[in-house]
Amino acid sequence: MSPARVRRPPRHWPCTAAARHGRRLLRRSLLGLVLWAGLLGGTAQAQSPTAARTFALQVAETSAVTLTGTPTLTLPAPGRTVQAPEGTASYTLTTNTEAPQELRASLEEPLPPGLTVEVAFEAPPGASPDGWTALSTTPAPVLHDLQSVQANERPVRYRATATADVAPRDYALTVTYTLTSN
């Protein structure tokens, strides 16, 4: 004897389609309710396993200074001091040292007798400027008390004076800036 066949209603019957649609709506509603409850952070929320890791971190000591701009000074007459136009030179300085540092300036070659060139730096917060500093081949401080500083695009000013003894020609000067410990 063969098993009795149960006849299923065809898919196009309105009652079956409505039942399927109702079940889908119920599943979506329940899923939305579960997600909404999870966003509220209810107390019945399951805890995720966690792990902690300890690691070593070392911050290296660093100090750097860069200068931008090439100012040009034209001395029209002996004995007259001329300053380079504002905004023609700037510096960027970064140091994270614990001990205070100082920025020094020196010329690669000596100036001819009667020619004086000076430089002045705008100090970053916490540092002290040394005002107008005459440049020579001996390093001279232009900023001091530099400690944990990050200064960007700070102004550098230059000025020059010449006596009648200085020959009228173009001079190219190279200034070296060095960060050192106080």
Image (tube, grey):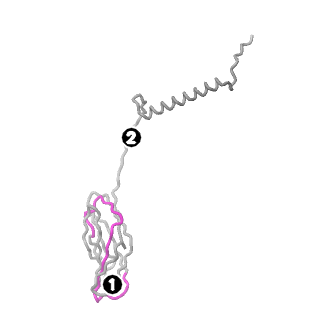
Vertical position of residue 16 compared to residue 144: above or below: above
Q: Can residue 133 be found in the magenta stretch?
A: no
Vertical position of residue 20 compared to residue 132: above or below: above
Residue drawn at 33 percent across, 67 percent down: 154
Q: Position of residue 148 (x, y in %)?
A: 29, 58
Q: Main secondary structure of the magenta part?
A: strand
Q: Position of residue 38 (x, y in %)?
A: 45, 33
Q: Quadrant of the C terminus?
A: bottom left
Q: Can residue 165 be found in the magenta stretch?
A: yes
Q: Which mark is residue 75?
A: 1
Residue drawn at 35 percent across, 67 percent down: 91
The disc, 2 or 1, on the residue closer to the chain's N-terminal end is 2
Q: Position of residue 28 (x, y in %)?
A: 54, 31
Disc 1: CA contacts within 10 A as few (<14), some (14-19) or many (>=20): some
The part of the chain drawn in magenta is: 142-171
Q: Secondary structure at mark 2?
A: loop
Q: Quadrant of the N terminus?
A: top right
Residue drawn at 29 percent across, 89 percent down: 165
Q: Name, please, the residue furthest toward the right.
A: 1
Say which quarter of the image contains residue 44.
top left
Which residue is disc 2 drawn over?
A: 53
Q: Position of residue 51 (x, y in %)?
A: 40, 36
